[in-house]
Image (tube, rainbow, N blue to C red):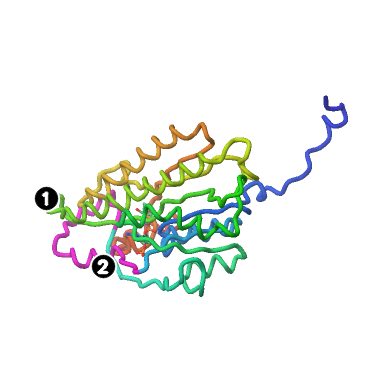
Amino acid sequence: MASPESATAPTPPVPALALFSLHGTVALVTGAARGIGQACAIALAEAGADVVCVLRRTTKSNAEHDKQDVDHKVSPPSDRTGDDGGTGESKEVDVTVAEGGGEAKAKTQGTIAALGVRAYVVYADLEDMADVKSVWARALGLLGREEEGGEGKPRIHILVNCAGVQRRHPSVAFPEEDWDTVLDVNLKACFLLAQAAGNHFLSFSESKGGAYGRGGKIINFCSLLSYQGGFTVPAYAASKGALMQLTKALSNEWAHANVQVNGVSPGYVRTDIRAGKWTRAWTAWSRRLGQ
Ligand SMILES: NC(=O)c1ccc[n+]([C@@H]2O[C@H](COP(=O)([O-])OP(=O)(O)OC[C@H]3O[C@@H](n4cnc5c(N)ncnc54)[C@H](OP(=O)(O)O)[C@@H]3O)[C@@H](O)[C@H]2O)c1
């Protein structure tokens, strides 16, 4: 039993930010080449995590597709802003990095490495389910030699499903191919990666979970269109609505094992996915709110 002295002894001071440190953990982030995914990957690294960036070998921005689709566009009424997505300039991203290390030329990878944590790259096209199904194993393979989990195996602690695509057409003319692309990247790939993460997280027993215990974190990037319908974006709205439901389903199922599954629904963020939607009105509005 604690002595009266120790019961009243002051708690040793712990710097507040240390409580949020991710030092010693590994996060896997999709869509890490640019936009919100890149910001997440860098922020996780700033908090101390090693980061596995999931990148495409060849970038295909939403803007490229939107340029092709320009003839099919229907502009929503100007006072309606629930249509998440956009058009804009195509940006090339230098992702010429050898898998598993090599020369760090990717912008995200270089920035992360400069923060003093490890940065890894796994290439995957999230429209290709064979690719998606191999991501987790390839990431563990890269970590294998360096990261030892509580049971002597490599470990990933955090999955961030951030990659996403947008296609815009009136619903009456929405191409089936674009429907499949959006649902595959925004929903199916997220599920398959979460399934791999869930299997991994649940494989760490309570007694042998290592320094971070058992469990893990999954963060899915949902959208305002998880709640709203938007205009000319039926596939995106369907995918993000379903992703939110998937988040709840997995959260219910895995909470007992200390696996937290959460969804984030960002407001409008000025990235390639909605570059062309950033009109003068948006700029004025965002200036008032702060970006
Ligand atoms: N920006 C907003 O206002 C906003 C609002 C709500 C929700 N969101 C959501 O937040 C997430 C990030 O959006 P963002 O604005 O950062 O978009 P972004 O700038 O367009 O970036 C999208 C990312 O997803 C990756 N990606 C797309 N298709 C892929 C594929 N087939 N395989 C692998 N990677 C693929 C892209 O890779 P590449 O670089 O190779 O193309 C890119 O890194 C998305 O899920 C989006 O739906 C955004």
Q: Which residue is mark 2?
A: 64
Q: Which residue is mark 1?
A: 172
Q: Secondary structure at mark 2?
A: helix
| In the image: residue 20, left or right of residue 9 | left
Q: Are marks 2 and 1 in contact (CB under 8 Å)?
A: no
Q: Which of the two labelled residues, at mark 2 and mark 1, occupies the earlier sequence position?
A: 2
Q: Is mark 2 within 8 Å of ligand 1?
A: no
Tell me the kind of residue under disc 1.
Val
Answer with the quadrant where ligand 1 appears in the image. Answer: bottom left
Q: Is residue 92 above or below residue 48?
A: below
Q: Secondary structure at mark 1?
A: helix
What range is drawn magenta here?
58-85
Q: Residue at image x 68%, y 47%?
A: 16
Which quarter of the image is occupied by the N terminus?
A: top right
Task: Kindly report the distance in space between the C-alpha atoms of the residues bearing marks 2 and 1.
Answer: 22 Å
Q: Is residue 123 above or below residue 208?
A: below
Tell me the kind of residue under disc 2.
Glu
